[in-house]
Image: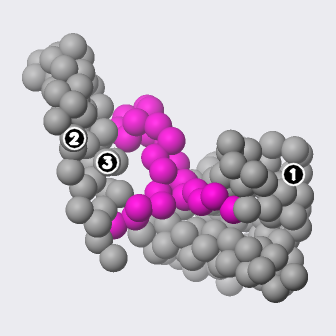
Amino acid sequence: MAYLIEFADRAARDLEALSVEKNAAESQAASRWHNGLEEAVYALANYPRRCPSGVIGGANERPPVVQDVIHATPGKIKKAALAMLVPDGYTVAYDTASQLKISRQWSSEETIRFNTDHWTNGPVSNCQHVLTLIPLPVPVDQAINVTMHWDTVCHADGGWKIWTRDNEKDVQWMQTTLANLKAKIEGADQGH
């Protein structure tokens, strides 16, 4: 579902003032920054839960993330996420109070397919999908803002390479997964 995105008068004035301040008419980097900011805002029309955590464009590009508010404790959210994703082959890679990283090792078929599809690049090995959940409290009774992002990590050329899962299909998967997590937790709470 697409939403209508309109800049408020003040936001439009602020964006124009930033463009002038950054000299976007004369600087390619400033122009990319300005255009990337506008694109990120307009992308909310198709991905309203997408939350660009940084300015799009150039070295400042940040991975797309999705977020939602879930009425539960961080521990309950992490437990439900694991219960939902462990059957799909995910295991805990890193768990602290501030984040949960879970990963799933690629199958040999996935690795072969990737290397075949990207034959002009060096081969990759030991690849995994890494899903990060970051629960942050919000000023509402037992509400947590859950941010999710998804990366692929592979060994290649003697080091590690990280690719952000940022195509539409992957962003949609994150949105659906987070919505299902919320429904599972809040639905279970309503049943009690």
Image depth: mark 1 or mark 2 in front = 2
Residue 192 in picture, x, y percent from top left: 87, 82
Residue 13 in picture, x, y percent from top left: 17, 27
Q: Please give the name of the residue rendered at 46% of the width and 46% of the height, measured from the top-left corner.
A: 52
Q: Does the magenta stretch mainly form a helix, a strand or a loop?
A: loop
Q: Mark 1 is on which residue type?
A: Tyr
Q: Mark 2 is on which residue type?
A: Ala
SS state under label 3: helix
Please report whichever mark, 1 or 2, sits nearer to the chain's N-terminal start: 2
Tell me which colouring the rendered structure shows.
one colour
Residue 105 in picture, x, y percent from top left: 78, 70
Question: Does 15 sit above or below residue 112?
Answer: above
Q: Mark 3 is on which residue type?
A: Val
Q: Is residue 162 magenta?
A: no
Callout 2 environment at 10 Å: few (<14), some (14 to 19), or many (20+)? few
Alpha carbon of mark 3 to alpha carbon of mark 1: how far? Answer: 32 Å
Q: Quadrant of the N terminus?
A: bottom left
Residue to which mark 1 is pinned = 94
Alpha carbon of mark 3 to alpha carbon of mark 2: how far? Answer: 12 Å
SS state under label 1: strand
Residue to which mark 2 is pinned = 8
Residue to which mark 3 is pinned = 41
User: Closest to the observer: 9 or 157?
Assistant: 9
Task: Say whether residue 170 is visible.
Answer: no
Image depth: mark 3 or mark 2 in front = 2
Q: Please give the name of the residue rendered at 89% of the width and 58% of the height, measured from the top-left corner.
A: 75
Residue 128 in picture, x, y percent from top left: 73, 64
150 vs 126, left or right, is left
Q: What is the span of residues highlighted in magenta in the rendered image?
A: 46-70
180 vs 8, left or right, is right
Q: Is residue 58 magenta?
A: yes
